[in-house]
Image: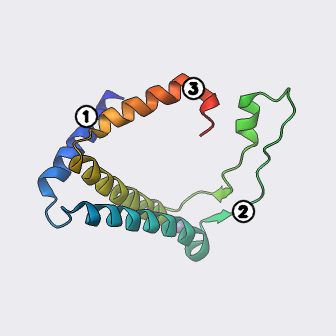
């Protein structure tokens, strides 16, 4: 876990050093939106163009008996994804996730926010609520 935090801090410093073109917060926020759009499109294309996965969306069941445990609820909730990404789609997904992280880091840098701190605070809040956070 500590290795990831160090990598995140290093990545944020790296972005700070190399970011010249998209220094404006307006460029950074619109680039983040664009990266998120490409991420979603990559997932769609894995299903519609490549076909390595299928997305079978159905209504989620939100009503359970009072005897249903949260672990059972977790098992019953669906991702709606069937199959596994092929090597090519996996690579594209990782590339788009990287772009999201890039612009997220740029925005954090603009406001002097440490993503490592954000990660730790979010983890702490989530741990406090545990499964009841319902994210
Ligand atoms: Zn694929």
The residue sitting at the top extreme is 128
Q: Is residue 9 above or below residue 123?
A: below
Q: Which mark is residue 56?
A: 2
- Residue annotated with mark 1: 6
Which image quadrant: the C terminus? top right
Label placed on residue 129: 3
Residue drawn 57% across and 26% down?
129
Any atom of ligand 1 within 8 Å of the CB at mark 2? no
Indicate which disc, 1 or 2, sits on the residue closer to the N terminus. 1
The one nearer the camera, 35 or 53, is: 35
User: Could you give the CA–CA distance between mark 3 and mark 1, rounded to whole angstroms?
Assistant: 26 Å
Q: Quadrant of the N terminus?
A: top left
Q: Secondary structure at mark 1?
A: helix
Q: Position of residue 77 (x, y in %)?
A: 72, 44
Q: In this rendering, which labeled residue sits more in front, label 3 or label 1?
A: 3
Residue 29 sits above or below residue 5 on the image: below
Between 112 and 37, the one lying in front of the other is 112
Would residue 6 be found to the left or right of residue 50 on screen?
left
Residue appearing at x 45%, y 26% in the figure: 124
Q: Position of residue 28 (x, y in %)?
A: 28, 61
Q: How packed is label 2: few (under 14 Cα within 10 Å), some, or many (20 or more)?
A: few
């Amino acid at each position: 876990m500590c290795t990831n935090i160090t990598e995140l801090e290093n990545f944020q410093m790296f972005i700070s050093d190399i970011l010249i073109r998209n220094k404006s917060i307006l460029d950074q926020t619109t680039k983040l939106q664009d990266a998120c759009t490409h991420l979603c499109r990559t997932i769609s294309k894995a299903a519609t163009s490549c076909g390595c996965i299928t997305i079978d969306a159905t209504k989620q069941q939100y009503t359970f008996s009072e005897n249903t445990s949260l672990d059972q609820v977790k098992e019953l909730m669906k991702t709606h994804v069937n199959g596994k990404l092929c090597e090519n789609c996996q690579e594209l997904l990782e590339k788009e996730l990287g772009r999201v992280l890039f612009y997220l880091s740029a925005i954090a840098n603009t406001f002097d926010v440490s993503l490592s701190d954000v990660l730790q605070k979010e983890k702490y809040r989530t741990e406090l609520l545990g499964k009841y956070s319902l994210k």
